[in-house]
Amino acid sequence: MSISSTILTGREPSGAPRSNASQRIIATGIVLVFLYYAASVVMTIIMAVLFAYFLDPVVEWLENRGMPRGLGALLMVLLMCSVLVGAISALWFRAESFAGDWPKYGAKLKAARQAVEKNLQLIETRVSEITPTEKQPAGTLRVEQAESTRSLLLEKLGSLTNIVVAATFVPFLVFFMLAAKRGVWHSTLQLFPPSERTKVKLALEKVGDVLRGYVMGNLVVMMILAVACTLLFWALDMDYPLLAGFTSGVLNLVPYFGTILSAVPPIILGLAKWNSPRNYIIVVVMMLAFHFIALNVLFPALVGRKVQLSALAVTLALLFWGWLWGAMGFLLGIPVTASIKVMCDHIEGWEPVGRWLGG
């Protein structure tokens, strides 16, 4: 009866909207579960896509000059790996020098830690006097500590494994994406009806522009912040200004928490030389100023025009992807959300979602 009425009237049964809503909720739940449990795989693919879109213009330029696309892709991947290895090696050597001088920093950090622990113990003692608690059986604390230590070790080993897997597979994925771009694009477009292929092609090109602009903008902002921090630390006569400047410049990119994180390296390094609070105040104020300028001037000019996300959408995206993927969620949350916005802009019926994300 419902089938015949649907054919005659051309309308869905009254229960169809509720069924479609339920199906969408179930599908969303399945996607979230997949993104959570396959996080390492998904994040590796996203990182490879970001690098591929970033390197693609240079590969196309080499191809237009007569170089085979596969060879151009191989050269760019090798260059990318060489630059990353060179930067990591340079920072590693500086970090080794810093490790050699660690005793003069460690003594002051130990004294500061002991002072903080003493104050915390004093507070805990006073609180326990007000609200005494029952004594726990001997051995309970030891078991909990052992369990927490074991869990922490396994968690760190798991994170290290994910990093090694990503570092191993990303170069190969980037090469295949660059070398077989035309074949991949053609196969992707064949998945859609002929009437929709033009719209899909425009959407993919827009996604490429957004991701490329995001990576380029962040690199430029990071270099500006790193140079500014290095010059500031050099002017303050700090040890290892280049190492501290690069580290603070990268940490300053962390949304909302960048001010606190970027001030930690110079404060630690300043313990060996600074006896007055003046330089510490300067560091905190300047890190706050750098973060404010990056967030309100550099990002809107270099990244915001490409990403086209509202401040509310960015905040919610960082909260969601940070909850789902941890630290990597803060790094990948904005480009993923920007890509979702582009897709919504080109999918019929989802345009309001795209407009909401863009503010």
Image (cartoon, rainbow, N blue to C red):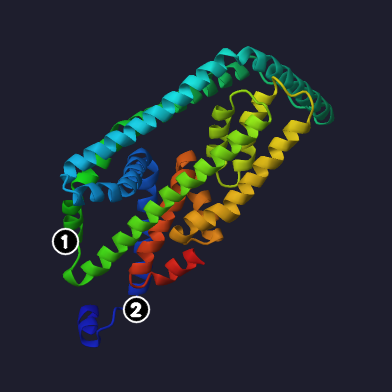
Residue 238 in the image: state x and y as whole percent: 65, 26
In which quarter of the view is residue 350 placed?
Answer: bottom left
Residue nearest the observer in this picture, 59 or 322: 59
Determine the CA span between mark 2 and mark 1: 34 Å
Q: Amino acid at mark 2?
A: Ser
Instruction: Choose the circle earlier in sequence order: 2 or 1.
Output: 2
Q: Relative to residue 297, is residue 326 depicted above or below?
A: above
Mark 2 surroundings: few (<14), some (14-19) or many (≥20) residues within 10 A: few
Q: Quadrant of residue 163?
A: top left
Q: Amino acid at mark 1?
A: Gln
Cβ–Cβ under 8 Å for marks 2 and 1? no
Element assignment for label 1: loop
Q: Quadrant of the N terminus?
A: bottom left
The picture places residue 86, in percent across and down from the top left corner, at: 39, 28
| Camera-nearest residue between 50 and 270 | 270
Q: In front: 149, or 260? A: 260
Q: Which residue is mark 1?
A: 190
**Residue 52 image position (x, y, % from top left):** 30, 46
292 vs 54, left or right, is: right
Say if residue 219 shows up in the picture.
Answer: yes
Residue 320 relative to residue 2: left or right: right
Q: Secondary structure at mark 2?
A: loop
Please say if 52 is above or below 188: above
Residue 14: assigned label: 2
Mark toward the viewer: 2 or 1:
1
The image shows residue 108, relative to residue 172, as above or below, that is above
Is residue 27 among what the camera can see?
Answer: no
Q: Percent from the top left, x then y, of residue 246?
A: 53, 33
Seen at 46% across and 52% down, the residue is 334
Query: What residue appears at the point 59 percent right and 42 percent down from the top-left corner?
Result: 258
